[in-house]
Amino acid sequence: MKRLILYRLAMALPLLILVSMLTFVLVSLSPGDAARTILGSNATPEQYAALREALGLNDPVLVRYWHWLVGAFEGDLGRSLINGQPVLTAVTQRLGPTVSLVSLTMVVTVVFGLILGIAGAVFGGRLGRIVDLLSLFGMAVPNFVLGVCLTAIFAVMFRLLPPGGYVAPDVSLLGWARSMILPVVCLSFFAVGILAQQVKASFSDALQSEYTFNLIANGFSRRSIIFKHALKNSALPILASVGVIFSAMLSGTVLVESLFYIPGLGSLAVMATAGSDLPIVQGVAVIFTLAVVIANFLLDLAYGALNPKLRTAEA
Amino acid sequence: MSDMVLTHKPARTKSTVRTGLGLPIRGVIALGYLGLLALGAVFADFIGVGDPLRQNLLGAKMPPGEHFWLGSDQLGRDIFARLIYGAREVMLGASEALLIAFGLGVTAGLAAGYVRGRLDSILSAIADMLQSVPAIAVLLAVLAVFEGNIHAAMILFGVLASAAMFRVVRAATMSISEERYVLAARLAGVGTWTILWRHLARRLRSVLMVQSAIVVALAIVNQVGLSFLGLGSKPPAPTWGSVLMDGAAVLFTDTWMIIPPVVMISITILAVMVVGDAFQDAATTRIGRGSPIRPSVRYMPGAGARFGTVAISNQQPLVEVSGLSIGIGGRGTPLWLIQDVSFSVRHGEIVGLVGESGAGKSVAARAILNMFPNGSVVEGTIRYAGREVVPPARGVPSPRIGYISQQPMAALDPAFTIGNQLCEAIALHDGARRGKEREKAMELLDLVQIREPSKVLELYPHQISGGMAQRVAIAIALSGNPQLLVADEPTTALDVTVQLEILNLLKALQQQKGLAILLVTHDWGVVARMCERVITFYAGEIVESAGVSDIFFDPRHPYTRALRAADPHGQRGVERLPVIAGQVPPPGKRPSGCNFQARCQFGIARCALKPIELETYGDDRHVRCIRLNELKVPR
Ligand code: SF4
C-alpha cells in the first residue's frame, strides 16, 4: 500500500514536469514566437528585438523553463500574451463552471454506469446486449456530435432547454440546472457506456466465481451476493476505469464547453489556442494534469481501503 | 472441477454467419464501407465527386436534391464533395496516429514482455504516465504552437495512445513466453524469436485489431473535434469538423444541414468499432439468456424420462431424487448432462457419488441445492425432508442444505473476513439471534476444530491455509443447522495429511450431529473410508448402486468391475479412480443402447439396440446392464 502511494507520487512529479515543459519545447521547435504574437506583424524589427529580450526569449529553452518553474512554485504561472492577465487569475475565474460540469457528469456517470452495468450482469441476455451497444454508440457518436443533435432537438425544435450559456448556481439554481442538462448528457454519454461495460464485465466475473457459487449454494440472499459480495470484489477494476474516464472527461470539457458557450477552463483553452496564447494553454494543461494526478491518488487510497491483500500486506 | 466445466458452458451459442475471412458478416459490411470511403476519397478527383471549394451564393443552403446530393452550405458549396474530400484528412490523420501508436506500443510491449526486469518497470512507468495525460490539453498546446497543423496533433496523439497498445502486447508476450514450447526453445537456445513471433502473431491478432480500432476511432473523434473547434486545417479546406460547424452555425434556420456530417462521422466511427469488435467476436462466444445468478432454468414434466422412475428405498429417506434428467440447450433437443437419475439418501447416512470426470455426479449433487447450469432443462423431482424442492415451490424459502466445494480457497469471498462471512451466514438463518452471531461463529469454528477461533474470525481468506479454509467452509455450510451436507470433492485440492483431517472431521460431524452427507468423489480411498452406500455414475447415468462392501467385493456392473479390477488395492489409501482404456462418451455423443458398450469387455450386439434399464438386483441394489444375470462370474 505504501509502495503504491510512493509510486504514484514518484510518477506525479515527472508527469507534471513533462506536461509543463511541453509548450516550451514546442515553442523552441516552431518558427513563430510570443513576441510575434503580442506585436502582430506590423511591428518594427527594433520593437521585436526589444520585446524578445524583455520576455527572455533569447535564453535557452531550459533556462526559460526553469524561470517558469520557479515562478510556478510561487503561484505565478505567467501572463496571458493577449491581455496580460495572470494565468492563475484567468484559470481560477473559469474554474467554477468546469467544476460544476465535471462533478455533475461524474455523478451521473457513476450512478447510471453502476445501475446499467449491474443490471446487465445480473439479468444478462438482452439487457447485457444493450449495455454493449450503449458503449459502442458512446464511442461512435462523440460528445460534440451528440451535442449538436441534442441542441437541434431540445433547443431548436422543442425549445425546452437553452441552446447554451451558463448560469451560476448562486444566481439561479433552476437556471443552473437547466443550463447543465444538455452538457452533462453529452459529456456522460460516452462515459456511462464505458463504465457500464466495465461494471458488467467485472460483475459477471464475480458472479461466475467459485465463491459466488458457494454463497448461493449455502443460501445467501441474492441481494447480499450482488450488492455486498460481488460489488466489493469488482470494485477495483471499476475504480481503475473511473480514473481513466475522469481523464477523458476533462478532455471532453474542451469540446462541450465550447459548444454550449460555458465559460470554463476547456473553452478558455480553446480560445487561447486559437489566439496562440501559450501561457494560458499551458496553464490549463497543467491544471488538468494536476486534477488527474490528484484523482488517481484518491483512487489509490480507495484501492488500498478496499483490497484486503494490499491492506494486510502492510501490517 | 470436472463437471464444473459443463456448468459454465454457454447455454446457447449465437450462430453468426461467418465469411471467408473468418469474420461475422457485419464485420465484412463495415470493412466494405470503410474501403469504399477510402477509395472515394483517394480517387475523388476522377470520379466526379464535385469541387468541395466552389462557391455559388445563388445556390446556398439548398437541401439535398438533384443539384447537391447532400445539399449545399451557406456558401453554396457541395456538402457531399466536402465530406468526401474531408475523408482524406480524416484517414491520413488516423493512419498517422495508428502508425505511431502501433510502432511504439508493439515494439515497447514486446521488449518489456520478453526482457522484463528493469526495462519492463521503466516502460510500464512511462505508459502509466502517458495514460494519465489529459490528451486534448496536450493536443491544444501543439495546435497553439503549430497553428492548424492537425498532423502534428495526430502524431502526438499516437504517442499518447501507444500506452494502451503497449499494455496489451506486453501482457500477451508475458503470458506466451511463459508457455512450455517457448521455454523449451529458450532452453535449447535456438530460434526463440521465431517461435515467440509465430505464436504471438496468432495470439495478438485479435487484441491488436481491437486495440487498433479503438486508437483509430479515438483519433477520428479527436481530429474531427479539433477541426469542429476551428483549430484544424484553416478554412476553406474541407474537413468533417468544419462541415459540422457550418451546419451548427445555421442550426436555427436550416437544421437539416447537420444531418449529413453527423451521419457520416458516426457511421464511420461505428464501422471502425464494428470491425474491431468482429475480430474479438471471432475469438469468443456469446452466452444466451440468463446469467450466473439468475440462470434460466425450465422445469419440464416428462421430457427426459426414458423409463418409469425406480423407487429405491422403502424407508422415508431424507433426500429422494426421482427420474432426474438435466440438459442444456435452447428450443431444440437438449444436450442431456444426466438422464433418468434416481437415488435417495437416508437420515445420517454418508452416500458416495462416484464416477469419472464428466460422468454427471456433480450436476446431480448440485441439483439437490436447486442449482443448475444456465439454460437448463430439468425434468424429474427431488424431495428433501418430505418437501418437494425440485421443481421449487413458489414463495417458499428453500430449505437449508450445506454445501462445500472442491476449492476451499476459491470458495471463500476474498474481500471479506472469515468472521464477516460466517456471521452473515448465521444471521441468515438465525434472525432472532441478532447480536449473538459472533458467539455462534466461535462455537461453529470450535465445532470444525479450529484453534483460536477469535483470531481466525479477523483473518481474510488469503491469510489462512487450504485445510483451514475448508474447515471454515464447513462451518459456513453448517451455520443453518442443515440435516444434509453436499460435499463436492471436498479433499481433492488438499495435501494428503490435510485430506485425512478433513475426512475425519466430516465423519465426526456425521456421528455427533447425525448429519447426512452426500459425498461426490472420484477417489476410492475416500469411498472406503467414509461411505455406507455408493452410487456409480457413467456418462450421465447411474450404472450401479450398492452398499460399500458390495461395491468393493462384489461389483456387478462391467464398468464397476473394470474399475475394481484395475485397482485391486483400492482400500489401501487415498487413490484416484483407476484408468480403463477408452473414453467416456460426452453428452450429445452418447450411443444408442448402453453408454458403456465401447469400453465393455462383455458387450454384445444386443447392448446397442435400445437404452438399458436400471434393474433391481438383490436387496437394495441396482445395476444397469442387460447381461446382469448372465455374468454371475465369481470374482
Ligand atoms: S449392457 Fe452390455 S455393454 Fe452395457 S455394460 Fe452391460 S454388457 Fe456391457
Image: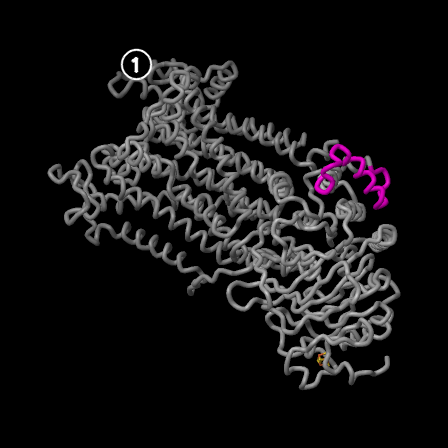
Q: Quadrant of residue A306?
A: top right
Q: Quadrant of the C terminus of chain B?
A: bottom right
In the foreground, A264 or B171? A264
| Quadrant in which ligand 1 is drawn | bottom right
Residue A291 position in % (x across, y down): 50, 26
Q: Is residue A43 left or right of residue A284?
A: left
Give residue A284's position: percent from left, percent from top: 43, 24
Question: In front: A239, or B116?
Answer: A239
Say which of A48 and B336 sits in front. Answer: B336
In which image quadrant can residue A296 be found? top right
Q: Quadrant of the N terminus of chain B?
A: bottom right
Amino acid type of the residue tagged 1 in the rendering: Gln
Q: Is residue B286 above or below residue B446?
A: below
Is most of the magenta stretch helix, strand or loop? helix
Q: Is residue B33 above or below residue A91?
A: below
Q: Secondary structure at mark 1?
A: helix
Whether residue B323 appears in magenta in the rendering, the answer is: no
Q: Which residues are magenta?
A: B427-453
Can residue B434 be found in the magenta stretch?
yes
Residue topped by disc 1: A47
Foreground: A142 or B94? A142
